[in-house]
Each structure stands twice: as structure tokens, then as C-alpha cells.
Image (tube, helix red, strand yellow):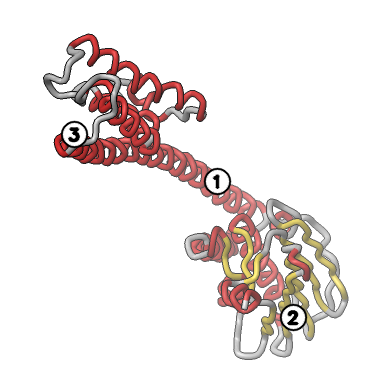
């Protein structure tokens, strides 16, 4: 089909009703005129010239217009070429001829519609393939850029002895966040699973409390949120509440009421050493800031412990919640 672009364009073209009606009239009139010029009597096969017209009308306009052309052709052929011209004929022989014509037209219309849909489905598949390839290349480029930025900033703000461990932790967080993108419902990922995976390496039986609504966040928020949580865990392990046996971290999230789709997540540390604001800008500052789908990121260095608030727009209740709400 690609070798004949004109045919491909004709099969894919969307025609307005008036244009389709005009072409249907032509599809009936042209074979009628051709049949009349060949043989004005009842000799021969009265419907011969109409078959290609029915098939072409179906291919170019759709099965409904093809059926209309078939019905109009049968009526005109009966009136003009069966029995006495100018008189509508109803007898056993005519009914048999009309029945055979109708059966042939059904086969032609079904075949033409199948071909028409096949061409359109192939075109849609081709468009989806192009879109997926473009999306894949876009994500691969973004992933390389993210990895490069993580390596550069980690090297800039880490000693040689710390570099491997720090970069490895961030790569694992990035990997876990990327895995979530393939399991989200309608392009979303579960917030409960995301938080649990982000803190998994730092969690013991009693040092974390995780609680919140059963909901999902947009896929664009998964990676930056996972990285932000990993950075908070790293800082808490080095300087905050997770650096002492009695320290504790609470992570709470709520979904706004009224269907506004705003998720508010709060990270709160307690039981650790006194906290002071950082004296220099490091890697954590780059990750703990407003970016992409994270519409708000605020970090407060309170003496009793760090508190961070993250807001994400476009969150949805989980499937179970939606089902219960609908019931």
C-alpha cells in the first residue's frame, strides 16, 4: 500500500456526509450509464457494472454507504433493465436475480469493509509504533541525563571514599522508581509501594511509621519523589533521627478532598540529635526542591528534627477506593 500513496490516502481519507453522498450518487449513476450504453435491453446480466461500484464505495466511504449504493443500484437495475424498461418488475425470476445480486453485494461489502479496516488499523499501528519509538528515545535520553547528573553531583559533593556508596544508593533508588512506572494504573504508580521501596534499605522494625490514603500518583512524579525520599533517608542516617537508636521517622500522606487530586506528603523526624540548617548547598538541595510533578517541596530544619512537605498534583484514589466510592 505504501507503494501506491494515492490509494493509501484515498482509503484513509475522512469525507464529510455531503461529499460521501455525492460520491455515492456517482457510484450509482456511472455504472447505470455504462450499462445503458452497452445494452438497453434485458439481455445479458443487468447488475454486472454495479459490482465494482459497490466495492469501491465500501472501500472509500465505508460499509453503510456501500450498502446504500447496493440498494439504490438494485432498485434502478430492476426499473431500467429487468422486464419492460420504466416498469418495476416483481416476479420469481426477478426476485431470484435481485436475491443473487444482494448476496453478492453482501460479500463485496464485507470484503471491502475488512480491507478498509485492515488498512486503517495498519496505519494506526504504524503511528503507535512511531510514537512508542519516539517515547522510548525520549526516556532513554532522559535516563542518561539523569544518571550523568547524579554521578556528577555525587562526585562533586562526596569524598572519594563515599562516592561509590552514595552513587550506588541513588542508582538503586532510581532503579526502583523506574520499575514502578510499568505497574501503575493508567499511567500512575501506587504511593504506598513507592514509599516502602524508597525507605526499604533504611527501615527496621520500629524506626519508621508509614501511613496514608490508598492512592496513586502520576508517573512523572515517581522518579523525583523516590529520589527525594532516598535523599531524606540518607541525610537522616548521617545526621538526623536515623543516626541514633531512639530516632524515628513518620511519613504521612493525605489526598485532598473534593477530587482536587492534590497529594500532601509529610516527612517528620524525631528522637535524633539537634538539627541545624546546612551551611552549604549539596546534592540533597538539588533533589529536595520543586521540580516536574512535585508542585511543592519545603524542608524545615527544626531543632527536634527535619520536616519536609511534598505536594503532588494529579493523584487519584486507588482502584479499590474508586470501586467502593462508586458502590
Q: Position of residue 304 (x, y in %)?
A: 85, 80
Quarter occupied by residue 160: bottom right
Q: Position of residue 57 (x, y in %)?
A: 34, 28
Q: Secondary structure at mark 2?
A: helix
In which quadrant of the rendered image does the C terminus lie?
bottom right
**Figure check: 162 above or below 1:** below
Q: Between 175 and 65, which is closer to the camera in this rendering?
A: 65
Q: Between 121 and 266, which is closer to the camera in this rendering?
A: 121
- Tell me if mark 3 has few (under 14), some (14-19) or many (20+) residues whose alpha carbon lies within 10 angstroms of its own: some
Quarter occupied by residue 206: bottom right
Q: Provide the residue designation for mark 2.
A: 241
Q: Secondary structure at mark 3?
A: helix
In which quadrant of the rendered image does the N terminus lie?
top left
- Tell me if mark 2 has few (under 14), some (14-19) or many (20+) residues whose alpha carbon lies within 10 angstroms of its own: many
Gap in angstroms between the C-alphas marked 1 and 2: 34 Å
Sequence-wise, the earlier of marks 1 and 2 is 1
Residue at image coords 48%, 28%: 15
Gap in angstroms between the C-alphas marked 2 and 3: 94 Å
Q: Which mark identifies residue 142?
A: 1
Q: Between 139 and 156, which is closer to the camera in this rendering?
A: 139
Q: Provide the residue designation for mark 3.
A: 94
Amino acid at each position: 500500500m505504501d507503494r501506491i500513496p494515492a490509494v493509501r490516502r484515498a482509503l484513509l481519507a475522512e469525507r464529510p456526509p455531503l461529499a460521501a453522498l455525492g460520491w455515492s450518487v456517482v457510484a450509482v449513476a456511472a455504472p447505470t450509464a455504462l450499462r445503458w450504453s452497452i445494452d438497453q435491453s434485458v439481455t445479458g446480466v443487468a447488475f454486472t457494472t454495479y459490482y465494482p461500484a459497490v466495492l469501491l464505495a465500501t472501500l472509500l466511504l465505508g460499509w453503510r454507504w456501500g450498502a446504500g449504493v447496493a440498494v439504490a443500484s438494485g432498485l434502478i437495475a430492476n426499473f431500467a433493465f429487468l422486464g419492460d424498461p420504466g416498469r418495476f418488475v416483481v416476479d420469481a425470476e426477478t426476485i431470484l436475480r435481485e436475491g443473487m445480486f444482494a448476496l453478492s453485494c453482501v460479500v463485496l461489502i464485507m470484503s471491502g469493509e475488512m480491507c478498509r479496516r485492515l488498512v486503517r488499523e495498519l496505519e494506526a499501528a504504524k503511528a503507535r509504533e512511531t510514537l512508542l519509538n519516539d517515547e522510548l528515545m525520549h526516556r532513554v535520553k532522559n535516563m542518561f541525563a539523569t544518571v550523568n547528573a547524579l554521578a556528577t553531583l555525587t562526585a562533586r559533593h562526596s569524598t572519594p571514599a563515599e562516592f561509590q556508596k552514595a552513587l550506588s544508593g541513588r542508582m538503586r533508588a532510581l532503579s526502583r522508581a523506574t520499575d514502578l512506572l510499568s505497574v501503575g494504573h493508567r499511567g500512575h504508580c501506587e504511593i504506598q509501594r513507592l514509599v516502602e521501596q524508597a525507605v526499604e534499605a533504611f527501615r527496621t522494625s520500629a524506626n519508621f511509621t508509614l501511613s496514608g490514603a490508598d492512592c496513586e500518583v502520576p508517573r512523572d512524579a515517581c522518579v523525583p519523589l523516590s529520589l527525594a525520599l532516598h535523599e531524606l533517608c540518607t541525610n537522616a542516617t548521617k545526621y538526623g533521627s536515623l543516626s541514633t537508636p531512639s530516632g524515628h521517622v513518620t511519613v504521612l500522606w493525605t489526598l485532598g478532598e473534593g477530587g482536587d487530586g492534590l497529594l500532601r506528603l509529610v516527612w517528620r523526624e524525631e528522637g535524633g540529635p539537634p538539627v541545624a540548617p546546612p551551611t552549604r548547598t549539596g546534592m540533597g538541595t538539588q533533589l529536595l526542591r520543586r521540580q516536574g510533578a512535585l508542585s511543592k517541596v519545603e524542608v524545615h530544619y527544626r531543632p527536634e528534627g527535619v520536616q519536609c512537605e511534598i505536594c503532588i498534583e494529579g493523584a487519584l484514589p486507588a482502584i479499590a477506593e474508586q470501586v467502593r466510592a462508586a458502590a
